[in-house]
Image (tube, rainbow, N blue to C red):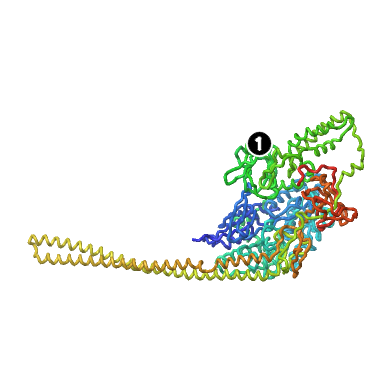
Amino acid sequence: MSNPIRVVCLGGGYVAMWLTKALRNAIIYKKVEMIVISRDNYHTYHGFIAEMLTGKIQPSQVASPARRIFEPAYFYNAEIENIDVIKQVITTSRSLDGRQYEVSYDHLVISLGSVDDLSRYPGIAEHAMKLKSFNDCYKIRNHIIQMLELAEIETDTEERSRLLTFVVAGGNYGGIEVATELADHFRLLIKKEYRQIAPDEIKVIVIHSGERILSELVRRFPELVRYAENFLHDEFSNLEIITNTRIVAATPEEAILSNGERISTRTIISCTGTAQSPLLDKLPLERDKYGKIVTDEFVRVKGTNNVWAGGDCAAVPLPTGGTCPPLAIYALTCGYQIGGNILRSIESRKLKAYKFTGLGDAVSLGNRHAIAHLKGVPLYGFNAWVAWRIALFIFVPSWERKLRLLVDWSMWPFLGRDIISMKVQEKQSLKKAYFQAGQVIVKQGDIGRCLYLIRNGEVEVLQEMSNGETIIQTIGSGEHFGETSVIENSPHIATVRAKTSVQLVVIDREEALLLSNSLSVFNDTNRLLSSDTFVKENIDEYHAIASDIPRGSIAPVNSVMSATLEAAPWQELPSKAPARIGSSRILTRSESSQPSKFGFLGLASVAALIALSSTTTYLLTSKKVTTPEPKDNAIASQKLEVIALGRLEPAGEIISVAGPVGERIGHLEVAEGDNVKNGQILAYLESYNERLQTRNLAAAKVREIQEQIKTDTLLRQVEAEKSQSEIEQVNTPQLLQIKSQQALIRKAEVELSEVVKTRDRFQYLSQEGAIAKQDFDNKQLIVRQAEENLNQAKATLEQLAQARSSNIRTAQTAFKASQVNLARVDSHSGLEPAKNNLALGQAQLERSIIRAPQDGKVLKVFAHTGEAISQKSILQLGDTQQMFAVAEVYETDVSKVKFGQEAVITSPAFTKPIKGTVDKVGNLVFKNNTIGDDPTAEKDARIVEVKIRLQQSEQVANFSNLQVDVRIQLNNTGKIGAKP
């Protein structure tokens, strides 16, 4: 039996559930093997989230075990790291340590859903609570009860108001359901449970950016929205709705609105703000303007034969126009449609188009009221609420959860709602770890998940090679490893093993990245002092400088420290190739003066220098020395900065996206100023349609040959089955004849035995004279006749056996011939050349598509639709999220410029100066390219390019190649280990 077709589904949502339903029989009969991959081993049902938040149902009722709802499919609980649609391989990793696994597929279903994106406005991501995952919802449930508990005992009026104000961002379905359930919940709770809270103290505020709430219904069913607005106004006195407004910022104590109003609150619940999974950015698949994967009418990803997509991450076309909205009913119908089309594809049947246009919509308004429409028929009040609850109940994933829901709904009106606030411990981002000698801490090839700081002990860094393990170096207390592999999310290229018993501090990746970005304030000096070795190596130099200060003068401590930094011997240290874990640098004791990405260990060194500075200050001031004034203030001030002309460039410089010179642009997909992603289609060449048709013809030819192969195979299989049947037809009747003849032989043998006994008895009687001799002779004749009959039966049996063998050999020869013909079908079909033509056509088609080589912004377009591509290329692209100023510093001044020195950039194009730091000093000397307005300036000067990282890149993101004035400050020493 051939191996089953493997279908891999990414994501454990509604698409996966109904895909499993569609493929269930094929999975059971081993025609299909299905694997669902998800980071969570449960499915969160969002239909009753509002009731879970308010204690009507237990939290576990909205979470269903993945292994039960996806049965009989296999379930992999893993993190998806990469999707390779060319090799048809999914790379996953386990959360324990990042170890990677690969899963191959024949058909891929992408249903990754969406992710929360609250980064648009400051403070929202940090202080707003989300409703996306089960963990988020559970935290909100506990938080709501905790706010009531705190308010019960709070005496400060302002703080009490903050605790009892609940802001819901978004007046959509989810926002209104959450807000109304909260308002109804609070109204009941304060009567029985929290009697010290007055009803008018609790406020639930909905912030909505549209003119009216429930924007999804306003256009088609304005009467439903009008009913909802009137009901909420009359029913809930503690519910306020603010429209035409959005939250633009948030702090721990308030929500700041776009109209300038500030709402004091400790609770902001966000029901808006989603984005596509970052995994989609790595895929070479067509996406729409919202980042969704574009599919055809069969829910198959455009340009592919075996990749399908559904749910929030897919733009599935509707029969009535537009694409499917991000609602569960469309996700599950897409999943079922994908399953059916995968089976049709496997069986080479015609695919069916997606024709679902929706059943209706419903939204709960609290207190057993709702609004709904069923295929355009509007429903109001209690009837709508019943319809809403029944519809949601039907789609609960498992009967187990349905029964539990019925129990909860039956109990809470009599026993009350659950108001337990569980103190769930947050994820510990900074933790200690202990390893014994010989244990592996980090394994080569695993994805970097943590940054490790060594508290005590030593570890070995080794690489696994074909000839065994090679130890690269040993590092010990006060050092760290795993840095860049964490930042770049890349595999470790070496293994780290405990040489002795070792104690570590382990920092999770998310927090390590946060610290890396947040500690830029230390990136001037603190990060440079990254180990005790630096302090020890420079103490002698420090004392030497201090001893040179004349008696009777006072040298400021900062001056002494600056002098120490300038005179420190790191410039003379021999360079060594750093060992790496993944892509991360591992500092050794001999390299301790090099900069560390994080300034953690530098803080200890700074503390040591401060203590040393204090001691020296005491010694110097006890001698009552004074500081002489500089003799020439003008000369001193001239050395404080280097002035140069420069230009602005995006990170990675400006990239020219080229194409075949002379060929025309068929269609330009982007315009100047557009932001693009790596791999995004920028333009189609004029030859695209012709090459697309060629590719399609090649694909049709492959399908035609495959159909012919299928037909020929069926014919040969029929011939083989006919030959096999003929063998049975020959064998069965003749075998029956042989068995019948064998029975006759056994009967003849028995008869012969009887007549022989009778003859022997008659022979004895004849010899005794009891009978006549004639009677004996008669019996002798009977014996001879029986012997002849037996011999004749045996001869007949032999003839039957020979005839059977001959007929079977003839039939088997015909069967083998049919098998040979069946095996020859593929080899004489021409399928391989056709596939080669298809691959060639696909490659030529790809060459007519111009894609973005990196993320960035379109800076300049040189060739528009219908225009020929010139030597200037098609367009220029740059990553303007981080801008640099490239200063052309005279070669005579470049020795004064150090990595990390501050710089000020000015230009008439922007209103105020922009600050930056020296990021790189070039190694080559050029002729100057930027010429200013000064007629006395050298026109052929020799310069070195110095790159300066700007601190406010967004202000100059649109000024690439702008000429600027650069002033590099020399009154600080810059950073140790300057970049070349």
Q: Is residue 90 above or below residue 704?
A: above
Q: Amino acid at mark 1?
A: Gly
Q: Residues within 10 Å of mark 1 (few under 14, many from 20)?
A: some
Q: Nearer the viewer, residue 548 or 766?
A: 548
Q: Is residue 939 left or right of residue 231?
A: right
Q: Is residue 747 left or right of residue 613?
A: left
> Exactly how many numbered labels are in the figure?
1
Q: Splitting the image into 4 quarters, where does residue 747 fall?
A: bottom left
Q: Nearer the viewer, residue 176 or 490?
A: 490
Q: Is residue 206 above or below residue 818?
A: above
Name the element at disc 1.
loop
The answer to whether residue 199 is visible is: no
Q: Splitting the image into 4 quarters, where does residue 658 fall?
A: bottom right
User: At which x and y percent is residue 338?
Assistant: 61, 64
Q: Nearer the viewer, residue 338 or 811?
A: 811
Which residue is tagged 1? 457
Which residue lies most toward the left here?
A: 769
User: At which x and y percent is residue 883?
Assistant: 79, 54
Q: Is residue 751 above or below residue 916?
A: below
User: At which x and y percent is residue 857?
Assistant: 76, 59
User: At which x and y percent is residue 58?
Assistant: 66, 52
Q: Is residue 431 left or right of residue 827?
A: right
Q: Nearer the viewer, residue 683 or 573?
A: 573
Q: Is residue 946 left or right of residue 841?
A: right
Residue at the (63%, 40%) spot, across then down: 460
